[in-house]
Amino acid sequence: MTSVLYDAPGPKAKARNWIYSGIFIVLLGLALWWALSLMAEKGQLDADKWSPFVTDSQVWTTFLIPGLLETLKAGAIAMVIALPLGALLGIGRLSDHAWVRGPVGAVVEFFRAIPVLMLMLFSFALYSRYTALPSDVRPLYACVTGLVLYNASVIAEIVRAGVLSLPRGQTDAAKAIGMRKGQSMVHVLIPQAVTAMLPALVSQLVVILKDTALAGALLGLAELLSMARQISANYANTIATLFVIALIYIVVNFALTSLASWLESRQRKSKKSTGAVVAGDVAEVDAGGAAGVGEAP
Amino acid sequence: MFDFLESGQYDVLGAFWVTVQLTLYSAAGSLIWGTVLAGMRVSPVPLMRGFGTAYVNVVRNTPLTVLILACSLGLSQTLGVNLGGDTFKETGFRLAVLGLTAYTGTFVCEALRSGINTVPVGQAEAARALGLSFFQVLTLIVLPQAFRAVIAPLTNVLIALTKNTTVAATIGVAEAALLMKEMIENEPQALFAVFAVFALGFLVLTLPTGLLLGWVAKRVAVKR
């Protein structure tokens, strides 16, 4: 226990901690008991509500795995498009020319201020009115468009923070050997910024994956969450279904979050890096990501 | 082009008022819940620390849509817990506030925890040397300073929360996103105008919040 907020517990404090633990466990137990008894009362604990997820492989092969794949697909496409776009916007915001900096800044601020859901709804309507996209791929296109518009602007901010986080000496040295602004950006700043940004970009992936659920709920994209309706229609087990689906999201996202914090700690320790790290919390949705947050020193 | 606003058919301001109310109630709720969580996560009782850590990791990695749907489909429709709302409208609103609070609380907690790290070690040590208990150290010395340090990150959380309230549209709460969906369907010829109106509404809600609280953050920051 290395916290400054309290001393290493002596015998008395240890006893007190046990008492608090006891009280806390009783409270938790009561809450759990209340929830379980409520569920039991409505028959949600019956074995046949939960067993399909173990015994019936069809639940997985027809619903959950295709749903998860669709979620991952939408997230991956959105990330692949948003990354270069965001990088361009981020570099644009750092431009020396006001006529580039200004408009790019306005675009970034605009799309950051609009909820993703609205961007998705808007692009869905746009596609159905003005394009000949077949209706079965329309939700995916709308979802990806919404995600790209929003996340490109967030990534732009991450890129900007990444470049700005580099020590001034890097730009100065590049200038000193006669590099132009563009050259120093491409050869000196961006390659270093990319490593500094990596943790933040991985945490942004979590945000994207979470947001695909919106397209499932309102646009009818066949992603993981939208399977909840179909499974519970077949087995009448709303709570069990939502529980399992939430669990899948948590496992996938927790793996990504852990990867981000691992990358970050490696970055901080690495002797090769400049020591600059863009914390995961630059992305405002994921405020307070893994970065800079630990046990009190 | 904007004649759909004059027809009196759509209550745009009313929808944004619901958005604002959702934001304010959830902000108050998640501030309280997040502070409690942060207190647990730094407390000397291992069990509470474990609970805090587990809660934050689980809830932060769950899509908000899943949480809000679970409140509506699971808690309300299947289990019959209705939080005392009389009408369908009220019930949905309260369930959305519950989901938003449960979700946003984790971000408030993490922001606060990083704020606790900005308080110099000597402050807590001095407080302990005076014989203050953990609870006193936390509430009298550390948290007041931590709060002043994290106003900027909390502003980001608040802005994200404002945008996240649109997720309540998935359970039919009559806020801005749901009205926009309805208007897009009914007024297909005015698609861009409808989007412009709602985009502007959100700019009006989020930009001043950021500017105002950014100014406050600078004013109240502890100068060290």
Image (cartoon, rainbow, N blue to C red):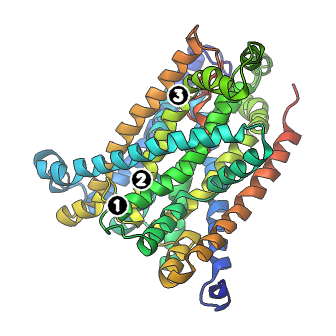
Badge 3 or badge 1: first in the primary sequence: 3
**Circles 1 and 2 in contact, beta carbons < 8 Å:** yes
Relative to B20, is A34 above or below? Answer: above
Amino acid, disc 1: Leu
Q: Quadrant of the N terminus of chain A?
A: top right
Amino acid, disc 2: Thr
Q: Position of residue B93 (x, y in %)?
A: 54, 69
Tell me which chain the residue with mark 3 is part of.
A
Q: Do badges 3 and 1 share one subunit?
A: yes
Left or right side of A100 for B32: left
Label 2 sits on a secondary structure element that is helix
Q: Would residue A221 be seen by someone viewing this image from the given angle?
A: yes
- Residue that label 1 marks: A221
Mark toward the viewer: 3 or 2: 3
**Circles 3 and 1 in contact, beta carbons < 8 Å:** no
Q: Which mark is residue A198?
A: 3
Q: Would residue B36 be seen by someone viewing this image from the given angle?
A: no
- Residue that label 2 marks: A212
Badge 1 or badge 2: first in the primary sequence: 2
Which of A155 and A244 lies nearest the eye of the viewer? A155
The 10 Å Cα crowd at callout 3, few under 14, some 14 to 19, many 20 or more, is many
Which of A215 and B224 lies nearest the eye of the viewer? A215
Label 1 sits on a secondary structure element that is loop
Q: Position of residue B23 (x, y in %)?
A: 64, 61
Left or right side of B219 for A275: left
C-alpha separation, residue under disc 1 versus residue under disc 2 = 9 Å
Tell me which chain the residue with mark 1 is part of.
A
Which of A162 and B8 lies nearest the eye of the viewer? A162
C-alpha separation, residue under disc 3 versus residue under disc 1 = 29 Å
Tell me which chain the residue with mark 2 is part of.
A
Q: Position of residue A182 (x, y in %)?
A: 68, 29
Q: Quadrant of the C terminus of chain A?
A: top right
